[in-house]
Amino acid sequence: MRIDYTVQIWKEGAQFVAHAMPIDVVSAGSTPGEARDALDEAVRLFLSTAQSTGTLDEVLEECSYERRDGVWQAPEWVALEKHSAILSA
C-alpha cells in the first residue's frame, strides 16, 4: 500500500529536522538527507504499527486522507507559506 506525504525540513542548531505532513511524524539528522531518511523510516514504522493494530484507517482519516477507489489520497496542498506575526513590546 502506498501512502503519500509532504516533507518539510529545517535547521535547529546543528541538527536538521524533517516533518511529515499531514501525519505529523518528525525526525532529525546531521544533514538534510539523514533527517529525510530517518523520517521515512519513522513514517513507515508509524503506519506499519497503525496497520498491525487495526487503526490505520482511523489514523489516516484523522489526518484528512480520503479513500477513493480503494486508494488513500493525501490532502491536496493549496499553499505553503511563510508568515510573520508582529508583537508590540
Image (cartoon, grey):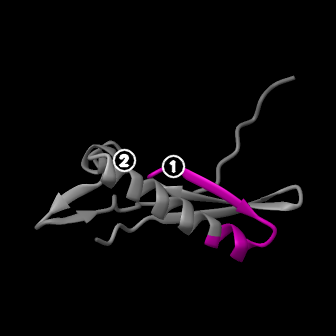
Farthest residue toward the top?
A: 89
Q: CA distance from mark 1 to mark 2?
A: 8 Å
Q: Residues within 10 Å of mark 1 (few under 14, many from 20)?
A: few
Helix, strand or loop status at disc 2 = loop
Residue identified by numbered label 1: 24
Q: Residues within 10 Å of mark 2 (few under 14, many from 20)?
A: some
- The type of residue carrying mark 2 is Cys
Residue identified by numbered label 2: 63
Q: Are marks 1 and 2 in contact (CB under 8 Å)?
A: yes
- The type of residue carrying mark 1 is Asp
Whether residue 11 is in magenta: the answer is no
Q: Earlier in the sequence, mark 1 or mark 2?
A: 1
Q: Is residue 86 left or right of residue 21?
A: right
Give the x, y percent position of residue 64.
32, 49
In this view, the residue in front, 17 or 49, is 49
Q: Is residue 15 left or right of residue 46?
A: right
Give the x, y percent position of residue 70.
13, 66
Q: Is residue 60 above or below residue 72?
A: above
> At 34% across and 58% down in the image, what residue appears?
75
Q: On the rendered image, what quadrant is the N terminus found in?
A: bottom left
Q: Which residues are magenta?
A: 23-37
Q: On the rendered image, what quadrant is the C terminus found in?
A: top right
